[in-house]
Image (tube, helix red, strand yellow):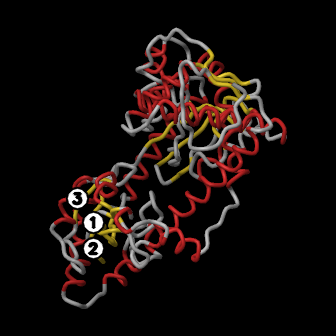
Amino acid sequence: MRKAWFVLFFVSGLCINAQVLVDKVVAMVGKHPILLSQVEIGYREKLAEDSSISKCSVLEELMFQKLLLMQAEKDSVTVTDNEVDAEIGRRLAYYINMFGSQEKFEEFYGKKVNVFKDEVRPEVKDQLIIQKMQQKIVGDIKISPSEVQLFYNSIPQDSLPLIPMEYEWSQIVIQPKVSLEAKMLAREQIESYRKRVLNGESMSVLAALYSEDPGSAKNGGRYDNVARGMMVPEFESVAFKLKPGEVSEVFESPYGFHFIQLIARKGELVDLRHILIIPKIQNIDVYKAKQKADSIYNAIENGSLSFEKAVQLYSDDKDTKQNNGVMVNPNTSSVKWGIEDISHLDQNLVVVFEKMKSGEITRPIQYMTPDNKPAFRIIKLNNVTLPHRANMKDDYQKLAQLAQLDKQKKLIKKWIAQKSAMTYIKIDNELYHCNFSAYWKLNN
């Protein structure tokens, strides 16, 4: 039901492997203390991703965050309660889904979700302010082609990034069409549940028993702190028009048929329950989709239809249909895909690409779409880039991103040097003898 979003690192309270520490203040940035436990927990978490990480680099990052908080107070950079509520709701939804249910989440942490929300609120609020303040510093940075060239020229040839093998590819997607009969059955089913709710039955119980939304059924169909943009438009257009206690009419979205009961409205956030019934795809629908995909493949193979024209005429993938089926890597916004990126999308595709040559197309391959529906795709391999050292011709976009990051880092270091000179900063020299990456004016 929810749109995908990038989930930020939550809070130290979610560190599963955190050990009990004898805590102490190891640094002060203005009025903001940094605790030994924060450094140790941050170090263990980052060590899992980067074996070269040091406790000094973790400490410096925490000092930078506190310095951002100090400056945010001076610049009156704030966030609203609604922004904090929405962020907590988004992060909790991610972790509850990871645990499988709210009950398992609460059992693991030994506290109710509402208690947990109250405990993490101050830290989440600080994190949002830190993000907003950092964006204020580096958000307007642009990089020009000449700067990219200068950055590239500054790197010794043997130190240029190694670029692994990459693939550029397109696809035609054919999805089975749900029959009108299946839609009618699903609608009749959910209309019966709505009538039962209107007649006084518990919507929470009915949702737990019958709703086919895995994200909310176990929680009685409930979603809390729903902000605009979190759900698909069809869902939001109904949810945000309801009054507390009101039950909507049955409506259709790309997921199926729903109805909603609004529990509470909190400014721009709403708490609600809903029931979802998904029209069922029958075997005959899958068979017809396979026949259609085979027919398209044969037409491309015998030359009566180009791949690009077939995309425009037949592909059911809205994201690529207007782009001749070209797949854009969401991690890089580039048309190039590394093996790791492909395996995250679909592990089975790795073997497919390793056997293909540029210009080849596959026979229809059955797979499951992100919303867990069967579909078929025909893949065209447009280009293969062999492993190599980065160069301006083939890797300009990657180099531009690296150059922009380098420019941002230099600006942040300059900002740290300026602001730390005007801020009381002290660290525990008994624990840390650090050569920081930026210049910090310390009061030790």
Task: Check disc 1: other Cα within 10 Å, few if <14, some if 14-19, many if 20+.
Answer: some
Outermost residue to the top: 22
Secondary structure of the residue carrying numbered label 2: strand
Residue 170 found in image quarter: bottom left
Q: Say which residue label 2 marks.
A: 384
Query: What residue is rendered at 35% in x and 54% in y?
Result: 369
Q: Please state which of residues 186 and 2 is positioned toward the viewer in this rendering.
A: 2
Give the mark nearest the N terminus, 2 or 1: 1
Q: Earlier in the sequence, mark 3 or mark 2?
A: 3
Vertical order, 337 against 8 (above or below): below
Which-is-in-front pick, marks 3 and 2? 2
Residue that badge 1 annotates: 165
Distance from disc 2 to disc 1, alpha carbons, whole Å, reads 7 Å
Between 222 and 121, the one lying in front of the other is 121
Q: Residue at 29% across / 73% down in the picture?
A: 385
Mark 1–mark 3 CB contact (< 8 Å): no
Q: Tell me residue 42's x, y (percent).
A: 50, 28
Question: What amino acid type is highlighted by mark number 1?
Answer: Met
Residue depth check, mark 1 versus mark 3: number of the one nearer the observer: 1
Q: Is residue 338 above or below residue 81?
A: below
> On residue 308, which mark appears?
none
The residue pinned by badge 3 equals 350
Image coordinates of residue 73 in percent, x first then y, are 81, 35
Report x, y in % for residue 102: 48, 23
Other-residue count near label 3 (Cα within 10 Å), few / some / many at <14 / 14–19 / ≥20: some
SS at circle 1? loop
Identify which residue is drawn at 55% across, 36% down.
Answer: 274
In three-dimensional space, the C-alpha distance between marks 3 and 2, rounded to whole angstroms, equals: 13 Å
Q: Contact (CB < 8 A) between labels 2 and 1?
A: yes
Mark 1 or mark 3: which comes first in sequence?
1
Asked whether residue 70 is in view, the answer is yes
* Kind of residue sitting beneath label 3: Val
